[in-house]
Amino acid sequence: MSIKTLDILSKYYGYTSFRRGQESIINSIINKKDVLAIMPTGGGKSICYQVPALYLDGLTIVISPLISLMKDQVDALKAMGIEAEFINSSLSTSEYNEILDNIKDDKYKIIYVAPERLDSIDFIEIMRFKNISQVAIDEAHCVSQWGHDFRSSYKRIPYFIKSLGNIPIITAFTATASDEVREDILNILDLNEPDIYITGFDRENLSINIVKSSSKNRYLLDYIENHKNESGIIYAATRKEVESIYEGLLKRNVSVSKYHAGLSTEVRKKNQEDFINDDIKIMVATNAFGMGIDKPNIRWVVHYNMPQSIENYYQEIGRAGRDGEDSECTLLFAPGDIHTHKYLIEVGIENPNRKLVQYKKLQQMVDLVYSNMCYRKSILSYFGEDVENDCNNCSNCLNEGEITDKTLDAQKVISCIARMKRGYGVNMIVDVLRGSKNKKVLDLNFNTLSTYGIMKNYSSDDLKTFINTLVSHGFLDIVENPGHRGSFPTIALNEQSMKVIKKEIKVEFKEDKVTKSAYVENELYERLITLRSEIAKNEKIAPYMVFGDATLKNMASIYATSKDEMLSVSGVGEIKYERYGTLFENIINEYIIAKNIDKSTISNKKESAFKDSEYFEVNTDINLYNKLKELRLNISKVEGTLPYMVLPNNSLKEISGRYPLEEEQLNDIGGIGPVKINKYGKDIIEIVKKYVNENSIEVKWEEKKRLKLVLDGDSRKNDEITLDLLNQGIDIKDVCDEIEISLSTVLGYICDYVKENKEIKFKIDTKSLYSESDKDLILDACNKLGEEKIGAIKKELPEHIKYENIRAVILEKYINE
Ligand code: ADP
């Protein structure tokens, strides 16, 4: 066949390139291999089976668990001009019969089917004589009891496949990566020597924030105020909490709806549609909301409570930013969340083994919340993916917010708890510290303690929050008191508390800054959005099925008014252009005329109004940079480490170009967190101050916040710079030194690059990077665990085998292909 898959992608979807993993998966399928693909939510699974469906002769059956999801997918396919339909219980008998007739007449390329429909005799009889090219199983983890969405109807799939006249290609897709689930999918669905793909789990466009110390409601309200124009989801742990957040927001005239299992099917359906159609901006929901949500422009997800596991968390935040645009995920944590989940597990799960597994998962989630490491790195490592560099896009890496010393207040709380002797709950401790005349306080003679009433300056709520924050940071413990009816957790001292009392450690909290949306008002874009809503309403489809937000932004920024210009915009395919292109062109044209815009000057610039506000430009001051490098070298000698372990080059460059004159300002510099500021901040600032004085530089400090740093005119990421340097013929070791990354990271970058079918213009001698005797061990571990799980592979192998050895072996497979 001569049509290339890339042509299909551009003709129908209007995308110019495949995302990570898509092309290899598609190639396997069109080469008639069964496939299991594990990709993160929003990674682009649908295209992996839809493009082959269009490429191959015959019909593709997609088995999908959710009715709402099916309708959306089919509507989106139809909007692109692809013949598709769905079969599920929502159809009337006559609609169902009509579809069966159309299948007989080969009218469709793709049909979506609910698993419950697979054993309908009519359906099987018709399918038996059809040329079925592919059976694609979406959300394949539903087949496994270990998954969180087990559906017994998924077990019927293999019987259905056996009933078909020809043997189709079977493809299975999921975002759930655990080994048990993977084994179940392979065995129960009976895949035939499948190609297994585990694409990276990282969703780079999601920033991950965990907020521990503030009042949740206040934070939430500020957050919503700052993100007014954007779609977002607020997840809460219980229906009750959903209701109360919803009511609170409604009272404040926020555009909000709600979703949980206690609402009727009709209400849920209506609310979900309002959200998808952009008629309301915010959805407050329990985790019942989500699996069918394909809305691509969800800009933020706030977890009002901590979720029960990292899997749940990652899946839920995965719903943000499917369109690839930057999106924010914020988890508001309070120690009480742990208690809620323990209760939910106790009452919700009977099987003792499952209960145990759930407790373990909960603990891993709690560990993540308390962790001081890069959150993204921790999450990816949980999924078995090893990442060497911090992400610089999570709240632990960025550490925004001012640090305040709360040691004295913490000492007051701790000494009060010590004096109260037995364990009490937070409320009682608050009462004593605030000098309450409550009967219980007086009965227990707590009014005679020296700590009675010493924290009256705090409101009751603030003091509660403060004590909870001490718990979240490990300065106090929470003791569960199981077994007693109506028992409640009490607060206890631990080793850390004693250290605080002895002034051995400081208690420093970061004030939680509420981020501001990066949304930029743009009149033309708003007009295009209005047109999109009108079209969507007329055609009874969701707005994003007309064009995505990013596509409209792009149209607006290049003022696209011709077919060629429109087709150059990602997301505009030929069929959509024919349907809607001129409508959008007309609006843009009107705008250009009304505003007297000279397009010739703007289109050269390409990126206009939107981009300017996303970047923060800094130029290195080479003299100051050299002085800072000297300092770094001295520190590294004293500490006996490598200079880049002290601070990365780019941090020094950024400091040199921005001239921070106060330690606090270092929080706004990339790659330097509070620990390092504590250690080196004073010396750095001293050097900068001296330099600024000597050279009479007038400093006007500006906050970078979340803007992307463009250092010396270069906004490329490390992987791009690496490949550019290597392709220019620079030696691999020099590249490591230049960018200050390890050899193993470089090998990983090269591997990703080659996997995307890009050509490398340099030679690399992988054989010199591992010993022959280790190679088989490494390959065995890769086959067993999946080669993306570098962390797990490393653990499986003897200690002497390093990451770079593993990566070299993997890379060799691709170079020699
Ligand atoms: P998943 O099913 O893996 O959660 P989807 O298949 O719904 O993800 O894809 C998520 C979004 O990414 C969709 O809006 C889709 O159109 C978009 N997308 C997928 N592949 C590409 C691509 N190659 N280029 C641009 N956008 C893509």
Image (cartoon, rainbow, N blue to C red):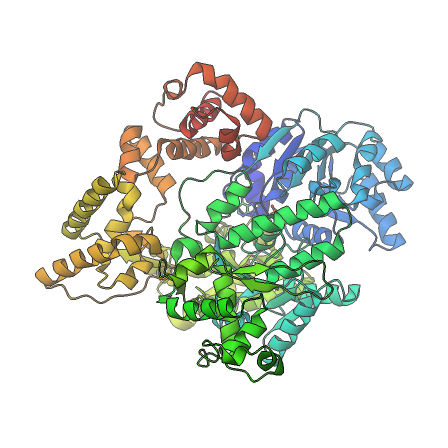
Residue 274: horizontal and vertical position, in percent?
67, 67
Q: Residue furthest top?
A: 773
Which corner quadrant of the image does residue 61 belong to? top right
Q: Nearer the viewer, residue 809 or 494?
A: 494
Q: Nearer the viewer, residue 160 or 622?
A: 622
**Left or right, residue 229 beside residue 75:** left
**Left or right, residue 777 beside residue 121:** left
| Residue lying at 68% horizontally and 53% vertically, measured from the top left | 291
Which corner quadrant of the image does residue 196 belong to? top right
Q: Look at the image and tell me in which quarter the N terminus lies.
A: top right
The answer to whether residue 322 is visible is no
Residue 475: horizontal and vertical position, in percent?
47, 60
Q: Residue furthest bottom?
A: 437
Residue 311: horizontal and vertical position, in percent?
61, 48
Q: Residue furthest left?
A: 694
Residue 99: horizontal and vertical position, in percent?
82, 47
Number of numbered markers: 0
| Residue lying at 90% horizontally and 41% vertically, measured from the top left | 122
**Left or right, residue 576 beside residue 643:** right
The answer to whether residue 650 is visible is yes
